[in-house]
Each structure stands twice: as C-alpha cells, then as structure tokens.
Image (cartoon, helix red, strand yellow):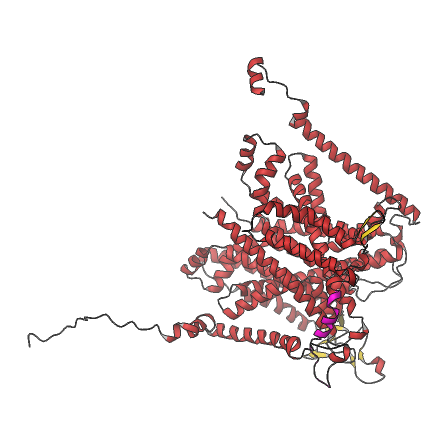
Amino acid sequence: MSVMEQDSAGAPARASLLYDPKVRSIFYQVLLVVVVVALGYVIVSNTITNLERQNIASGWGFLENTAGFGTNQSLVQYSETSSYGRALYVGFLNTLLVAAIGILFATILGFIIGIARLSNNWVINRLAYCYVELVRNIPLLLQIFFWYFAVLRSIPGKRDKWSIFDTVHLNIGGLRLPKPIWEPGAEWIGYAVIIGIAASFFVARWARKRQEDTGQQFPVFWTAMGLIVGVPIITYLVTGMPMTLEHPNFVETGPIMLRGFELNVGINVIPEFLALTAALSIYTASFIAEIVRAGIQAVNHGQTEAAHALGLRNGPTLRLVIIPQAMRVIIPPLTSQYLNLTKNSSLAVAIAYPDLVSMGGTVLNQTGQAIEIIGIWMAVYLSLSLITSAFMNWYNQRMALVER
Amino acid sequence: MATTKMFHIRTEEAPHLAAPLSTTGIIGWMRKNLFSSIGNTVLTIIGILIAYSLIQPLIQFALIDAVWTGENREACLPKDGAHSGACWAYVKAYFPQFIYGRYPSEEVYRVNIVYALFLMLLVPLAIPGVPFKRLNALLFLIVFPIVAYFLLTGLVIGDKVVLPIVETAVWGGLLVTLVIAVTGIVASLPLGIALALGRRSKMPIIRMVSIIFIEFWRGVPLITVLFMSSVMLPLFLPEGVTFDKLLRVLIGVTLFSAAYMAEVVRGGLQAIPKGQYEGAMALGLRFWPMMYLIVLPQALKLVIPGIVNTFIGLFKDTTLVLIVGMFDLLGQIQSSFTDPTWSTPSTGHTGYLFAAMVFWCFCFGMSRYSIFMENKLHTGHKR
C-alpha cells in the first residue's frame, strides 16, 4: 500500500509513529529503564523498612567489632579477639589458597588424563575414559562428602599415624609436614633462587638465538634445572646451612590425652583442606581432561605427520608442534574451568573449611548483616572472575595465531 | 640338456595363507594395542594394577561383603574382625524416604502420578521419531507444570478439599531434586532466550542490562545465590509477604541457570547465518515472527546438546540446596546417617555409594542423550 501511495504522492508516506523502528527502540529502552528503576526502588525501600523493623543497622561498622570465634586454618595472624573484617580476610585468603592449589593439581591431573585418553594403549585409554565419565557425572558436593566423611574418617585416629619416610605423616588430624625454620643468612638462599631463575632465563634466550643462527642445540632444560636447584643448594651449603626442618613431634608415651602430634610443631594441613582440594581437583580434572583431549584432537593430523617427516621424534613433536597449537583451543575453556573451580571452592561451607563463604556465614549468623555479607561474597567472587578472565585473555592473546 | 626345464610356471594359485597368528585375532590385537613396546607394556601392567586396585575393593564392598537383608543395624555390624560390606538393607529400609522425603505415605500416590506423567511426556519428547512434538512440548512445558503443582502441593476449592495440602517442608529426596532441576530448566529456558536476544539486541540499554545480568549471575557461585534467596529475598519483599522456602530456592536457581542458558542460546543464535535473518526480513517478517518462525527453531535445534549439558550441571548443582537446609536426595541421605537404628561403620559409605549411583545414572544417561542428539543433528550440516 505504501508503495502505491508513494508513487501517487511523489513523497515517502509517513508511517505511523507507532511503526517507526527508532521510536519503538527508544520506547522499549525507556520502558526497561523505568521497570529496572522501579524494581530497584521497591526492593531498596522494602529492605530499608524491613531492616528498621528487625533493628539491624546497615553499614560497614560491624567489620570493626570483635569476632569471638576461632578458626582452624589462617594464613595470617588471627584469634578470637580479631575483628569481623579480619575474619573475612582470613576466609578470603583461605579461598585463594584452596583455589590455587586446586587449580595446580587439577591442571596436572587433567593434562595427564587428557593425554591418556588419546593413548594407543587400550587399557590406559579405557581407564582415562572411565575416570572422566565417572567423576564428572557425580555431583561435586557428594564427592566432597565422600572424601571428607568416608575417606578421611577411615584413616588412623589422633593417637596413630601413617608415615612416608618418617617425614610426611597422615592421620585424622590432617597431614603433618616438616616445617622449614629460617635462620639468619637464609635470605641468601632466596637470592640464589632468584639468580638461578634469572640465569636460566638468559641461558634459554641465548640457546634459542644460537639454535636459530647455527642450528646447534643446547640442553636448556637440564642447565636450567641445575641453575635453579643447584645454585641454591650450593648457597645453602656455603652459608653454613642456615635452614633446619622442624619435624612434627609424635608423642607415644605419657597420658593418653596428650599422645599424638604435638600442637604447633611442624606444618599441619587440616583434613577439611585435604578433602576439599582432593574433591575439587579430581572433579575439575575430569573436565580439563576432556578439554585437553578436544584441543589435541583439533590439531590436524597432518601436523603430526609433517613433524615426523621432518625427523622429529614423538616427544619433540608433541612439545614443539602439537601442544602449542592445541593450547589455542584449550585456553578459553580452561579459563572457565579455573573460574568454576574457584567458585566451587565455596562448597567448603558444607564441611566447614574456613573459606570466605564459611567465615562469612558465621559472621552473618552472629551479626545478621545479610546484605553486607552477601554483597562482600558476590563482590569478591565477581572480581576474582573478572581478574582471572582478564589474565587469561591476556595469555590467550599471546598464544593466539599471529597471522600476516 | 637343451630341453631341461629350467623354469617353473605355477599353474594353480598359491594357497591363501592365513595371516600370522601374532597379527590377527585377540593376540594380534593385544600385541598392537597393549604390548607394542616395552614402555607400552609397562603402561598396560600399571593400568591393569590401578584398575584392579580400584575395582576389587569396590566389588568386595558392594557385592561380596554386602548385607542385603536385615531389620536394623545388627545385620550390618562387622562380624568379628571381618570388614563390613555395604549395608543395602539400610538403603532398602530408607528407600521411600530417599524417593519421596517425608511426604505423607497416604498421599504418595500423587507423587507417583507426577513421576508417571513426567515420564509419559518426556520420553516421546526426547525420541526424535515420535510425532506430535508441538502438542507434546506444549503439554510438557505448560500443562504438566500446572497439573504437577496442584498434585504435589494440594488443591482446595472453596471449602472443599480436593487434594489435602502438603507443605513443601515435608518434601524431600529425589522429589525435591527433580522439582528443582526440572523447574529450573523449564523456567530458565524462556528467560535465557530473552536474555540471549537481549544481549544481541541493537538497543544499547537492553544489551547492557542483559550483559550485566548474565555476567553477574555467571560470576558468582550458586551457593551465594542460594544464601541470597533464602536470607536476602525475604528482606526485599514488603512486610507480611512471605515466600515458601522451596519457591525462594527455585527463584534463585532459575535466575542462575537462566544466565548460563542465555550463553548457550547465544551460541546458537550466532551460528545462524546472517542470510537467514535477512531472508526473514525480506519476507516482511517483523522481529518476533522472524525469531519465532525462522531463527529460534534453527538456533535451538543446534544447541540442544548445550541445553542438555546445562541441565546436567543444574541437576548436579541441586545438591547444594542441602547447605541452606533443604532435603534433596543427598540431603536426605546425609540426614539418615544420624538415625541410631541404622548407624554402622558402613552406613555412610553405603549411602554415598547409593547417591553416587543414582546421580551417575541420571547424568550419564543425559550426557549419552546429548551425544546422540549431537550426532543426529550433525548430519544436516555435513557437506
């Protein structure tokens, strides 16, 4: 119809304002803003009246108050007389710790299983397949319960232990490790480590340059190992062994209540941490394994054949040709698995590992400051997510295909 | 001398020799796949040892040493020094609780009807060859939730009690797990589609709001969402308005999974060639008919595996509700450990084993289905 009108009138017909896409779009957006603002207003005003009714003073003042509850693991000085803010900080550090260790183990295990999944060996291949299908189809919380309530309850009790080489001990109280005691002069060992790392970095650069110029190879890996491990050991010996190990002290005689490991001697890894780390890394590893498998399979088989044709053996083929290309496919989903692991570490609350959610939950119960605590939780996890994805994006960009 | 035959011409075909024994059959297969080199042999042996050390105790525990019948803990206590096996008698005794929670036993038939309806509608929907998909989907997504709602919670018209009211506080076990998972997925699908469309919209404010919403929910752990819905949501509501606890959890779970669903659907929308949009517009379709008739049917079909995967994730995540004090399957099992009638050293292990088996069957079944659909749908895109 409008075409006809246009023909006869010679000028474009003005459609109704109702059908103008621009007007419509502005209308919808204004409508959305109004709805969001109205919803926000209702929520805020309801919350304020509800809080007044329940006599809860909103605000951050409670963070200064004395917490009055202890914890069984803190990376910084913390006691019952510390403040709520300090308690949340302790929880935050514990979350970071379990996430970092979990990510480390999950990555190692995930890569091993993922590569095993591609093995020509039928037994290894099937074993890896069963691992993946079994672990990723069982809820994480159930696995945490399994490790905490089923596995860690069937190991020796407080008055008994399992030991490996008499240095690492395990019982229901957790894992006991020797604790290094640093004496004056120990800082030289730290410097030696830094020097070793720096030196191996330069050796690697020099070796690469030499290989590109002359084609001669240099055993970079072993040299670096020697530098990073050897130099500190020599320093340790030269400076007169300024570090000793404090072994956990297991008391076998005396009053029954005092038997078992002496308190505060050596490092004690609490069982909650062990169970949580085990469950998180094993669960996440099954997803990482699938990502690794898909990533390696995404590299064209021709690449392997070409590498073999160039005379590379299996090891160098994997290291120099396949993995660098597979990493491009692997990294984006790997990032989201790392984020998932970090977020899943909040399940710690189920076994009372003192992470951010667990500590925050105690604070919430004591103070009733629900909005502030949940706000802190969400802010922390959101920023962890954003920081991790920013870092991974940066890494991804470095690894990305550089095209001409 | 001159006519001595110095050559030989074979007149019949050489007999077909069987391939060497070492390259065919089971031995050949083993040589190729298990013992092709020393390293491989070592790996095989290590693998077999690992498998044996895992499977043997499991079979010993779950089958050989297991106790199948019994009235109370006496049956399952370890007999003089021997290891105690799985206490299946305990699972048998608790089975109704694991499936229905503390749902009154005279009303349990209502739950059974819901389970049956659910299966009757889901199975034909899931099998690609069965006709009447549209009607089926309509029944499953709209009629079934309403019917199930009244069947499970009860129905009172005026003063007449058609179905007695059953408080959600007594629901539990698999019932709660399934209610949360199914409601979460059914309710989050439309919301997720809307968010995905919003994220791809050309209107900046709508796009921004969608992005903030999606990234917010994806950035926080579900457990904080559950705490929020159980602690904070009541604060948001006007005085006097209270929500059922289950409903509060459902709202949290739905918003949470809608964000994940939105990302899955967005993937599907991005995979649709621009020509499809342009073709629809050239036909004079407006936005919603274009989406409804052209784009979404193709996009959703592409992401069925993704939707199923989200569903698997959600199904596993329903266990988290036990942290906010609800009794899903895992919560119900966990709470049954405190019962002194059945407290034995092996009760906990048995309970976890049972929970693991149930969850594994559901999740593995769904993941197989997702792979099946992927293969089925993939054919259309093969060149």
Identify the residue at horizontal 43%, vertical 55% (top origin).
A302
Q: Is residue B247 visible?
A: yes
Farthest-out residue, top:
A9
Residue located 70% across and 29% down the image: A26
- A277 vs A223, nearest the viewer: A277
Rendered-image quadrant of the N terminus of chain B = bottom left
Q: Would residue B89 be counted in the magenta stretch?
A: yes
Q: Per the image, is B361 magenta?
A: no
Q: Residue at x 51, y 50 (%)?
A: B378
Instruction: Give how far across and how far down residue A362 sits, in percent.
Output: 84, 59
Q: Nearer the viewer, residue B64 or B117?
A: B117
**Figure check: B107 above or below B304:** below
Q: Does B286 sit left or right of B341 as displayed?
A: left
Which residue occupies the foreground of this view, A213 or A282?
A: A282
Q: Residue B289 is drawn in which quadrant?
A: top right
User: Does the image show residue A105?
Assistant: no
Residue found at the very far left of the displayed protein: B2
Residue B272: percent from left, percent from top: 55, 41
Q: Nearer the viewer, residue A138 or A65?
A: A138
Total marks shown come to 0
* Direction front: furthest residue: B160
Q: Which residues are magenta?
A: B79-97
Residue B83 in the image: x percent, y percent?
70, 81
Question: Is B82 situated left or right of A325 in this image?
Answer: right
Direction from residue B310 to residue B167 in the image, left or right: right
